[in-house]
Amino acid sequence: MSHDGVGLRAVMRSVSFLTAGALAVPFLAGCSSDEKVSKPLAGQDIAPVARNLVADGGTLKWAVDALPETLNTFQADADAGTSRVAQAVLPSMFRLDAGGRPVPNPAYLESAKVIETEPRQVVLYKLNQKAVWSDGREIGAADFLAQWRALAGKNSAYWTARNAGYDRIEKIERGADDLQVRVTFSRPYADWKSLFSPLYPKDVMGTPDAFNDGARRKLKVTAGPFKVDKVDTAKKDVVLTRNPRWWGKPAKLDEIVLHAVPRDKRAAALAAGSVDLADVDPADAQRIGLAARGAANPLQGSGKTSVKRLRDWARAHDFHSDDVKAGQKKLRKAISEYLDDQQALRGIEVRKSLEPAYTQLALNGSTGPLADERVRRAVARALDRRELARLVLTPLGLPAVPVGSHLALSGQPAYADNSGAIGDLDTKEAQALLGDAGWVPGGPVKEQKKTQKAAGPEQDKSKHEKKSDGDKDGEYVVGEDNKSGGRGDGGDRHLAREGKQGGAQGAYAPQGTAAPAAAAVQPLAKDGKPLLLRFVLPTGAGSETLNSVAERISAMLERVGIRTTISKVPDTSYFKDHIASGDYDLALYSWPSSAFPATDDRPVYAKPVPAADGSVNVEQNYTRVGTDQVDQLFDEALATLDEGDEVALIRKADSRIWATAGSIPLYQRPQLVAVRKNLVNAGAFGFQTPVYEDMGYLKKGAKLPAGPAGSPSPS
């Protein structure tokens, strides 16, 4: 999963918080705005070279999860492909640097700053005088005005997914000349840099029809190094070609083709040459690493190779069970085809970093035992987050450091490790919290079915377990490549499925890793009911690694007397029917980080409120845990124009989110990108927005720089 630029935010996060009650919330020194900014745990891995070493011409075939349903990032069904297109063909006033911070984009801006704060906040944009749309018209105030009117939320004819920030604008005017745009806000808005990234032409934003339908399959007018040539639904391609009116450094590539390829087909596509760059899962990364080293060939030598030897070799190389069980002739054929692909994969390498997203354990606080804050805190104190991070990241050769914030990642200004608000692993404290909540050993607890083990969770024999052959499992990220696959500006994050097929790395354990044995602890009960939590996970090929993390968590909880059962549900229903609807106790899914947490993270942690029809509006707060205090801190952060004050408020909000224990950040997700070895300035981008005009193939005779690129070791 690749990173999205500023403004291509897939979804907003909401804010959960701790109410004053039986448990005090410690104030952390980490909330000080004077704390030094951290560094990213892993840098980019893109084989960077100077432009003069990049050949002119060529096509980059880039795998995406699906053909985008729309090219309008502000619509609800925008996805990762939408964001890729927008980054390459549309203006963004700001983009992200290597630390995930918004910086002015010189291709479009000479400057942008707050010039007045009283009586209203006024931002003055001075545009690059060379910046023009592909039809020759200057980018200017008319485009800003049209986008504001479309996204302000006042005209319901526009089918917009989000309007955060635009709803705070009072007016937009031409400045001293055509290259200046004055934006006046009705209320102070700290995250003003999130706006107009991307910026669409007035042709798209000017009318509801153009907004709703006109930009779904085509963009006639663009203003980036590339333009949209065509969307080919038959081939599942979006073809981007050089923009002849681009005023910046010319694109090195002739074209970029975004080609839809399922996750489980990407290794074969790379071997066949139909893809040059693709996010891959750890199994394929291992396979590519084996190809680089040259795997042993069990077919060489004697033609009397035993079936046992062939099957042992096939198992060691992750062949499917049906292939392993095949007769000798079929198995030899499968191995031969595999080895041919391995030979072709020698021209591929894996570039790796950490994705700007983290995986969390979500605790549903709306019902059952986890509605009690003390039980949620006990779960948090029972977890060894360092062990879980090592389980996932160490086999990939990536830094195994637990995430310490809900609202930022290491390297971003707002990051501080606020996990002290809940405390580190402490089984005695966890047991004390459970006892205080009334959960005590013994009592009239009914025997559990043999199909449900206390520590080693098994599949819940429920109607949800039934799956079709097409079901795939994986981890779920809210906001893919945005993360909408993009990070659009303000507003709701689009849900992106992450995993074997969906695109993100979830939990990865070495093959054969077993959960540690848990110390025998007498079951806990309250009012005659056992303390038993339902851990919901998706099913499908490749779910073993995700299960490994869940099993490890279950074993940790078993040590303090909390029993779990894992309920495996079809991938297609995992999020909608379980996470979003609240049909779970425990779950694993991920959120992307944001350069604008005051705007984007509020819906993820906001206190649920009753709706007019009697239902509860949870926004994106799927744990349903929130408080008025956290909401207030987010509101204050959003309204301050002092960056230091905003950081301090965000950190304070995060410490209180930790204390509520609605969700427990575990680890930053790995970013594994398979690329053709001579492809440069592309790969694992980390936080930074890709520079599309610099991507290309190394000139013949030129040498790649030494860097961190390389394939993960087999697990």
Image: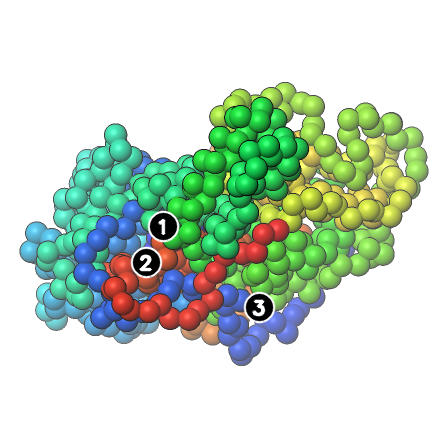
Determine the image quadrant of residue 97. bottom left
Q: Are marks 2 and 1 in contact (CB under 8 Å)?
A: yes
Q: Is residue 152 above or below residue 527?
A: below
Q: Which residue is mark 2?
A: 679
- Tag in front: 1 or 3: 1
Q: Which residue is mark 3?
A: 416
Q: Circle 2 — which element? A: strand
Q: Circle 1 — which element? A: strand
Q: Which mark is residue 277?
A: 1
Along the polypeptide, which appears first: circle 3 or circle 2? 3
Q: Position of residue 419 (x, y in %)?
A: 66, 62
Q: Position of residue 520 (x, y in %)?
A: 89, 44
Q: Is residue 373 above or below residue 69?
A: below
| Residue density around tag 1, few if under 14, some if 14–19, many if 20 or more, within 10 Å | many
At x 47% / y 66%, what residue is drawn?
708
Q: Is residue 457 above or below residue 707?
A: above
At x 80% / y 59%, what residue is drawn?
426
At x 83% / y 34%, what residue is drawn?
530
Residue 8: in sight, yes or no? Answer: yes
Q: Amino acid at mark 2?
A: Leu
